[in-house]
Amino acid sequence: MCNACLIENVRKSAFSRRDFFRRSAAAGVAAVAAGAITARPALAQSSGQVVDLTWTLTPEFPTFDGNPGIMFESDKDYAADGYKIWKVTFYEHSGTHIDAPAHFAEGADSVDELAPESLMCPLCVLDITAKAAEEPNAMVEAEDIEAWISTNGDIPEGACVAMNSGWEEKMGSAAYRNDADGNFAFPGFAKSATDMLLEMGVASIGVDTLSLDPGNSADFAVHYSWLPAGRYGIENLKGLGQLPATGATLFVGAPKHEAGTGGPARVLAVV
């Protein structure tokens, strides 16, 4: 399916699901708020090692629609003005960035309305690098969540669950976004997994790819269920392979512009 057709189908579907979004968002916010208290004990376990999970945002950074996500224009210069200022224009969903509930749900929380407690939380890392090496559109499935819990214990309420697919190794090549035929191709979450995480009270999910849904998704099922439930997502993470499966604390430097559907973020993990 062409990019324009996919986006148009998403737009049409958004109108038909608007009432569902409004109902889900209210319930989701309460659940996240209830789970956010688990962030404080997670901080006490930290040894102080900081891992930066954020890519530097440049005009060349790959984006979903293929257009530059950020543009720079010199406003003040050292020679003429004695100091430097850039005028920066960016699209919200560029680089390492947040998807707020309002991205896919009219009337849901915008990025400036995210609960601060949900931006500092336990981090659980699911490794699907082996599966992604075999299948570019590999997904975190419900059975992957179950296997993680069997090995590592329960996922805390209010946590962020992040997918490590090893996709950051493709950064700088066309393969980060597309297959050899020019089709979207990258790993993401399956709805079976995010439905399970919703029931657990998880606050956010993260991916080291362009989208919460896999590249070959035709319906954005995860975006359409996760975000309207009052949760947020983080896309284009890096460095997840440096972290343990459990025990790290996530710090999300979310932007705070009015009515924002998301935005570039500085994301750090402390181990």
Image (cartoon, rainbow, N blue to C red):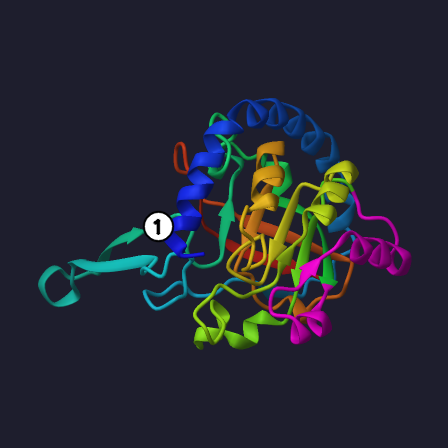
Look at the image and tell me in which quarter the N terminus lies.
bottom left
Indicate the secondary structure of the residue bearing disc 1: loop
Which quadrant holds residue 46? bottom right
* Image quadrant occupied by the C terminus: bottom right
Residue 268 x, y percent position in the rendering? 58, 58
Seen in the picture, residue 89 relative to 32 is either above or below; the reply is: below
Residue drawn 40% across the image and 63% down it: 57
| Whether residue 96 is situated above or below residue 199 in the rendered picture | below
For label 1, count other residues whose C-alpha is less than 10 Å away and answer few (under 14), some (14-19) or many (20+).
some
Does the magenta portion include 79?
A: no
* Front residue of this view, candidates 231 and 78: 231
Q: Position of residue 158 (x, y in %)?
A: 72, 40
**Depicted 180 relative to depicted 211: above or below:** below
Q: How many marks?
A: 1
Residue 120 found in image quarter? top right
How far from the left and from the top, in percent, is residue 198? Answer: 72, 38
**Residue 87 in the image, given as x and y percentages of width and height:** 23, 53
Specify the farthest residue to the left. Answer: 80
Residue at the spot 49% in from the left edge and 35% down from the top edge = 13
In front: 122, or 164? 164
Specify whether 138 is left or right of 257: right
Q: Is residue 261 visible?
A: no
- Residue located 79% across and 54% down the image: 145
- Classify 103 as above or below 206: above
Amino acid carrying label 1: it is: Tyr
Residue 93 in sight: yes
Name which residue lies at 73% across and 47% down: 192
Residue of label 1: 91
**In terms of depth relative to the viewer, which is nearer, 136 or 128?**
136
Which is more toward the observer, 137 or 247? 137
Q: What are the residue bounds of the magenta stretch?
A: 127-156
